[in-house]
Image (cartoon, rainbow, N blue to C red):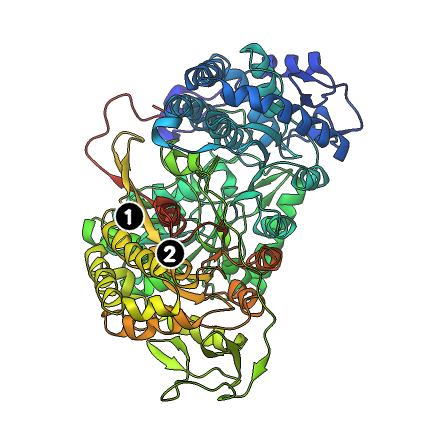
Amino acid sequence: MTKVSEIMQTMEYGPSTEDASAARDWLARRGAFGHFINGSFTKPGETFETRDPATGEVLARVTQGTADDVATAVKAARRAQKGWAALPGTERARHLYALARHVQKRERFLSVLETLDNGKPIREARDIDVPLVARHFYHHAGWAELRDTRFPGHAPLGVCGQIIPWNFPLLMLAWKVAPALAAGNTVVLKPAEYTPLTALAFAEICQEVGLPAGVVNIVTGDGATGAALVAAEVDKIAFTGSTEVGRGIATALAGTGRKLTLELGGKSPFVVMEDADLDAAVEGVVDSIWFNQGQVCCAGSRILVAESVAERFETLLSARMARLRVGAPLDKSTDIGAIVDPVQKDRILTICHAATDAGAELVGGQAQEGCFIAPGYLKNIAPANPGMEQEIFGPIATLSTFRTADEAVELANNTRYGLAGSVWSESATVATDIAARIKAGVIWINGANMFDAAAPFGGYRESGYGREGGAAGMRDYLAEPAVKPGREAASKPVVAVTDGAAPQQGIDRTAKLYYGGAQKRPDGGAMYAVPGGLAPLGSRKDIRNAVEAATKAGKWAAAGGHARAQVLYYIAENLSARAAEFAARTSRAEVDAAIARAFHYAAWADKFDGATVQAKPGHLVTVIPEPMGVIGIACPNAQPLAGFLSLVLPAIAMGNAVVAIPAQDDPLAVTDLYQVFDTSDLPGGVINIVTGVSADLAVPLAAHEEVAGFWHAGPAAELAAVDRAAAGNLKPVWAVPARDWTGVQAQGETFLHHATRSKTIWLPYGALPAGSGSAAY
């Protein structure tokens, strides 16, 4: 027997296994599980096994959902939605509050069940996941109460289809179900095939609290069940999972007009500057990549260390890594539990083998018996190495160095993803500078993997779009205020003609394209007849040239809101001076509306603020609206001048550059704007205009890799092709409803929300109050 004196010397932990009898008894009583539809469990159908990844033991048999099962659940949700939405906010809040309380009452049971089904250490399920689940329901009980006050004119979407992953099964359920219910929607949720058990336990909680039948429906199954939900008659799909599946969902929904939010993969940078507290940074690595066995979409899987401190950092990291305990997930002293399934273990090892075959060196990371992999990292790794490019989704990081801050930022952004990042520096100036320049939706400064229901979470680029948490997350579960519908004029056939084929009064004028601050002839040299003369017939090559010009206008975003406002005021001033000329081209109503738009968005340019949200104590959590980058815009065919400026001006007011396709039938009112822009101090490349056939130009513009978002106000027949093109690199598409572009509904905050994406910055702030250190305090 080991003596106490020996233990005090080695400081080795003894086993401290959490009792799982309550969870196992519950599983034994339940037997095989059916779906949860319309407030009750269905009779089990064809089933599949869910196993404890640590032992391989079968935990339960769960029903494989079919398309008919999904359709039944959607019908139940549809029947329940009207009544649920009609409840006063206080009533919905009471239901959400009850869900939070019952989660807390069953914390230990849910923690054990989650650990059995997922393989994560019990400490993480107990101290992080389940408290955050309760926090989300509490937080959104407040949003249910305040919805109409904070989001006037908004309405529930209807029925929301939700597909969640296996890495945080119950927490991802809460992230999605809580805001949907607070907004007045009903849901059909499909949990991951590997980890359905806590979702089914949550269904029991829904029964316990008396949630109206049909408000929450849970259909279990594999990817085929998820595909059936995507194809079902729901009003929104919310998906968390792989980028590849997210791209497929975006393609499947192309042209349907249904709302979609995607929280996808990541390859997040973990940047350690030379002045960082290296001991703290090493603990940050533990929290970032070795938390939940590295099965975290926002894990800091790319460690970037200043060359001057890299040797010391790696020494500390190796020593800390060697002390991590890999073992039974139910043991309270385990640091790293089981990989969720042998398939996932094989995938991790395959990527590691490919990385070492390509020249990288693996430190640690050994495969162990069963579904376990020791923590590790890949060093001496090239930027194009598979281990650097692919999301490993396991306890394996990469380690590389940099010399300057600029190089650190370049390496951090050298990825197709943009979910999160972590920056370590003792200088607030250095840390915030790096944080501002990393292209990601969430940045932690001197911290990692911190979450809160009040702090929006979501990514840039191929990490998806939309946000979960806070006001931004609520907005994604609400329909925007309705507008009085207008009629989009059908485009006329375009026939290319030779330059000069139409007679003109006075000195001949040749309209041109406009990009990079200069007028350009179309690449093919062709023109087409429009009212008042000939317009350039733009092509794919012209779109590429215009986007290239737009990408070089980055200083516009850095100019600040006040400077941008001045330019918009100048545009209004110069447009007013030429009002009679433009009125002759269009109408006085359009000119007046265009001037009003310039004044409106000049006013907003320095007033569309972010927010500091009340999240975890000890942190200043700031949500900043950032410009998208380059926005492609297909303008309406009706009211060409007012429609064009109603869309372009809010985009540039927020710091974006735009490539716009003006009205196909009557673009010359817009080509006359070039001189207005040139005399209004508008930098070259901020507004770029390519005239021509909207259907031929919109698709290559939406597909362009450098375009971050697309607004489509053109013909509805184009929308499906535009959506499919945008799915290539997962850019959001806003299908702008037709309206009277001279009216008040053609301006407002809705346009500004679509012109920005939120960036959540976590900064240490003050002392952490005693007793507030848990994940949900």
Work out whether 551 lies above or below 481.
below
Work out whether 411 lies above or below 29.
below
Residue 204 image-quadrant placement: top right
The disc labelled 1 sits on which kind of residue?
Answer: Leu
The disc labelled 2 sits on which kind of residue?
Answer: Ser
Residue 442 visible in the picture: no
Q: How many marks?
A: 2
Label 2: state its secondary structure.
Answer: helix
> Which residue is denoted by mark 1 in the rendering?
278
**Residue name at image x 39 percent, y 27 percent:** 147
Residue 697 position within the rendered picture, expressed as x and y whole percent measured from the top left: 54, 69
| Left or right of residue 706, residue 652 in this image | left
Q: Which image quarter holds the C terminus? A: top left
Mark nearest the camera among 2 and 1 is: 2
Label 1: state its secondary structure.
Answer: helix
Residue 116 position within the rendered picture, expressed as x and y whole percent measured from the top left: 60, 26
Residue 506 image-quadrant placement: bottom left
Residue 266 position within the rendered picture, expressed as x and y whole percent measured from the top left: 48, 50
In the picture, the disc for residue 687 is: none
Q: Residues within 10 Å of mark 1 (few under 14, many from 20)?
A: many
Residue 7 position within the rendered picture, expressed as x and y whole percent measured from the top left: 40, 25
**Residue name at image x 77 percent, y 31 percent:** 68
Q: Return the residue nearer the eye: 224 or 434.
A: 224
Residue 745 image-quadrant placement: top left
In the picture, the disc for residue 646 is: 2
Between the residue at mark 2 and the residue at mark 1, the CA separation in whole angstroms equals 51 Å
Q: Residues within 10 Å of mark 2 (few under 14, many from 20)?
A: many
- Whichever of labels 2 and 1 marks the residue nearer the N terminus, that label is 1
Q: Are marks 2 and 1 in contact (CB under 8 Å)?
A: no
Residue 492 visible in the picture: yes
**Residue name at image x 21 percent, y 36 percent:** 765
Q: Return the residue nearer the eye: 777 or 241.
A: 241
